């Protein structure tokens, strides 16, 4: 597991209000099926921006970005996240 993936799991556990522990979610599991809502997506985005000291670009603000840990990891790495 990469540092970015670990950081995403930490933020998911703390701020996403999921129906299962973040540690039990697979990299490609659908986070919306695990309880992520549009409101918790906003909290998740803000928490990830704070943790990784990045800002999600407008083109990344779509459901697909927040669908899974792997999709979040890919976007975060692309915009320069470092844990």
Image (cartoon, rainbow, N blue to C red):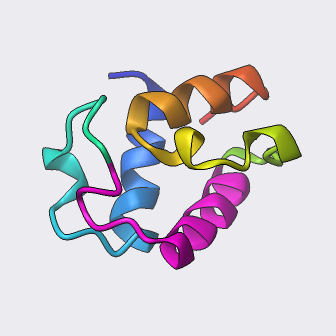
Seen from the viewer's position, the closer of residues 68 and 63 is 63
- Of the 4 image quadrants, the one containing the N terminus is top left
The answer to whether residue 33 is above or below residue 15 is: above
Q: Residue at x 53, y 71 (%)?
A: 38
**Quarter of the figure with residue 67:** top left
The answer to whether residue 74 is above or below residue 23 is: above
**Quarter of the figure with residue 26:** top left
Q: Residue at x 13, y 47 (%)?
A: 24
Seen from the viewer's position, the closer of residues 9 and 59 is 59
Q: Residue at x 66, y 48 (%)?
A: 62
List x then y, in percent, for residue 32: 34, 57
- Of the 4 image quadrants, the one containing the C terminus is top right
- Tell me if 61 is positioned left or right of 36 in this view: right
List x then y, in percent, for residue 82: 67, 31
Seen from the viewer's position, the closer of residues 42 and 21 is 42
List x then y, in percent, for residue 71: 50, 30
Find the magenta span and give its range: 31-51
Q: Residue at x 78, y 48 (%)?
A: 53
Residue 54 in the magenta stretch? The answer is: no
Q: Main secondary structure of the magenta part?
A: helix
List x then y, in percent, for residue 20: 15, 63
């Amino acid at each position: 597991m990469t540092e970015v993936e670990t950081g995403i799991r930490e933020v998911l556990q703390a701020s996403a209000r999921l129906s299962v522990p973040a540690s039990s979610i697979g990299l490609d599991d659908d986070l919306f099926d695990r309880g992520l809502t549009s409101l918790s997506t906003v909290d998740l985005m803000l928490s990830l921006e704070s943790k990784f000291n990045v800002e999600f670009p407008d083109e990344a603000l779509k459901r697909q970005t927040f669908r899974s840990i792997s999709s979040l990891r890919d976007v975060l790495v692309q915009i320069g996240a470092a844990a």
